[in-house]
């Protein structure tokens, strides 16, 4: 966090999101479903519409709309690169994180064989498990799981140290858990993996709406994100360090471009979504202060982080005070995102979210594909209820949620 003063208020932010005007009966809808996908500001929908109505084309041809589409993609690559502290040619776009990760695992799998090991963690969304698990079957590699502590919701660092060996080729790790909100000290894990000669893939999908990352400082080889989790369209992206992007044996069409990052991208991209991707980064930057876009982004994310910390502190306290509620994951004060999971004694998670939805409170339930976490807590069958705070969440909405859970 920097000590810059927030340059924007939550009311200003909210005024950019038309979805927040939605009423249910006469109750305003409160969206706590951000970890599953956030609402979008007008800047994003305007950019998508403008692209489709005025520039729509395929790329790499010589007429204006095609050249404009090339520019839209380049602009978005530059914007995402700046958000991650990466180079423009290190950002590949795709439909979503899961598809990009399967594509990467296939390419990396061509370098692996029996005896090689991949280390994953129990805290991960299965989009960062299944692509590596596939290599057990396809390439005969061994998958090793790092445990987490169910009391604290934190990674077991001793177990990580044990699981990393000279046979480890890759550590696949989340930057933050989408079920518990745990923020993992990714830099420390990367250092440990590099010390045994392994590469690191970071799933930053759940962290990126809440905290900016710097891939150069992290020094990871790969990092994936999803734009629809941070107020943009349904687009995924993968950062790959330039030298690795050039050396990967990716599945691709012979006539498609072989330069980085295009060589990683299969088929025609979602150009309208990519137009919206450039727009969301620009929108974030407009909320911050600084002399470069990156500085503005840092300042905007610091502001969001401050708001999120306050909101989750109150939500945690308000729910913890209720006898029927069990909370999971790290308590406030521990590095965490403003996302929490809970259960209500005597009620199925789906019945809780149905009842809350009647009050205009939109929450998700289930295991959120963080299946192993649900398994460790014995909640695979009943599932969690998940409340996620976004940059447009207000303290009034938090109070409404606390009261609604209390009166279930
Ligand atoms: C932490 C995390 N990783 C990966 C994913 C998968 O992202 P996508 O839907 O872009 O494939 C999600 C989606 O919920 C997630 O929360």
Image (cartoon, helix red, strand yellow):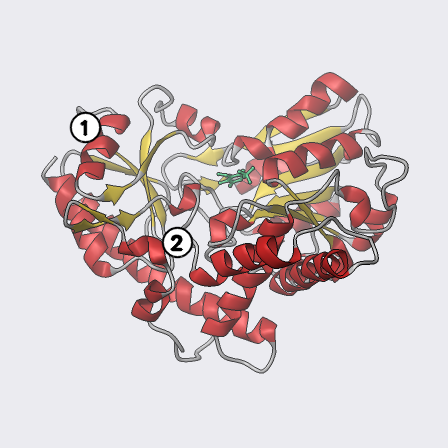
- Vertical placement of residue 407 versus 60, above or below: above
Which quadrant would the C terminus be assigned to in this image? Answer: top left
Residue 294, by quadrant, is bottom right
Residue farthest to the right, as pictured? 254
Earlier-in-chain disc, 1 versus 2: 2
Q: Residue 320: image x %, image y %?
A: 20, 44
Q: Which residue is mark 1?
A: 345
Residue 167 is at least partly visible in this image? no
Give the CA distance from mark 1 to mark 2.
26 Å
Which residue is drawn at the image coordinates 35% and 59% (left, top)? 308
Compared across the picture, whether 22 is left or right of 257 comes to left
Residue 46, x across and y down, in percent: 50, 60
**Is 162 situated left or right of 113 in this image?**
left
In this picture, residue 41 sits left or right of residue 251: left
- Helix, strand, or loop for circle 1? loop
Which image quarter: residue 263?
Answer: top right
């Amino acid at each position: 966090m920097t000590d810059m003063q927030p340059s924007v208020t939550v009311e200003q932010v909210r005024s950019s999101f038309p979805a927040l005007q939605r009423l249910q009966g006469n109750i305003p809808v409160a969206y706590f479903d951000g970890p599953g996908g956030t609402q979008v500001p007008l800047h994003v929908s305007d950019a998508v519409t403008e692209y489709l109505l005025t520039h729509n084309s395929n790329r790499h041809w010589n007429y204006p709309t095609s050249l404009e589409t090339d520019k839209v993609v380049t602009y978005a690559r530059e914007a995402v690169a700046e958000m991650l502290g990466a180079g423009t040619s290190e950002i590949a776009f795709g439909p979503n994180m899961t598809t990009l990760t399967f594509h990467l695992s296939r390419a990396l799998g061509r370098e692996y064989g029996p005896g090689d090991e991949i280390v994953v963690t129990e805290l991960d969304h299965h989009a960062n498990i299944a692509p590596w698990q596939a290599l057990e079957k396809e390439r005969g590699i061994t998958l090793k799981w790092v445990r987490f502590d169910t009391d604290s919701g934190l990674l077991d660092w001793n177990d990580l140290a044990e699981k990393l060996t000279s046979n480890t080729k890759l550590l696949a790790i989340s930057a933050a858990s989408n079920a518990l909100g745990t923020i993992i000290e990714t830099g420390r894990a990367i250092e440990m993996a590099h010390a045994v000669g392994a590469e690191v893939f970071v799933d930053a999908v759940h962290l990126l709406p809440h905290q900016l990352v710097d891939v150069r400082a992290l020094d990871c080889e790969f990092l994936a994100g999803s734009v629809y989790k941070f107020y943009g369209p349904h687009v995924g992206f993968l950062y790959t360090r330039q030298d690795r992007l050039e050396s990967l044996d990716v599945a691709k069409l012979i006539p498609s471009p072989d330069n980085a990052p295009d060589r990683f991208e299969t088929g025609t991209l979602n150009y309208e979504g990519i137009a919206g991707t450039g727009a969301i980064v620009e929108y974030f930057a407009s909320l911050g202060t600084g002399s470069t876009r990156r500085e503005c982004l840092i300042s905007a994310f610091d502001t969001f982080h401050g708001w999120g910390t306050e909101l989750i502190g109150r939500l945690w306290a308000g729910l913890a005070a209720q006898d029927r509620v069990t909370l999971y994951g790290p308590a406030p004060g521990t590095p965490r995102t403003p996302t929490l999971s809970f259960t209500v004694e005597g009620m199925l998670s789906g019945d809780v979210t149905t009842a809350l939805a009647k009050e205009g409170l939109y929450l998700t339930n289930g295991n959120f594909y963080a299946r192993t976490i649900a398994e460790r807590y014995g909640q695979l069958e009943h599932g969690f209820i998940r409340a996620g705070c976004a940059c447009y969440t207000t303290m009034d909405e938090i109070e409404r949620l606390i009261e609604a859970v209390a009166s279930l």
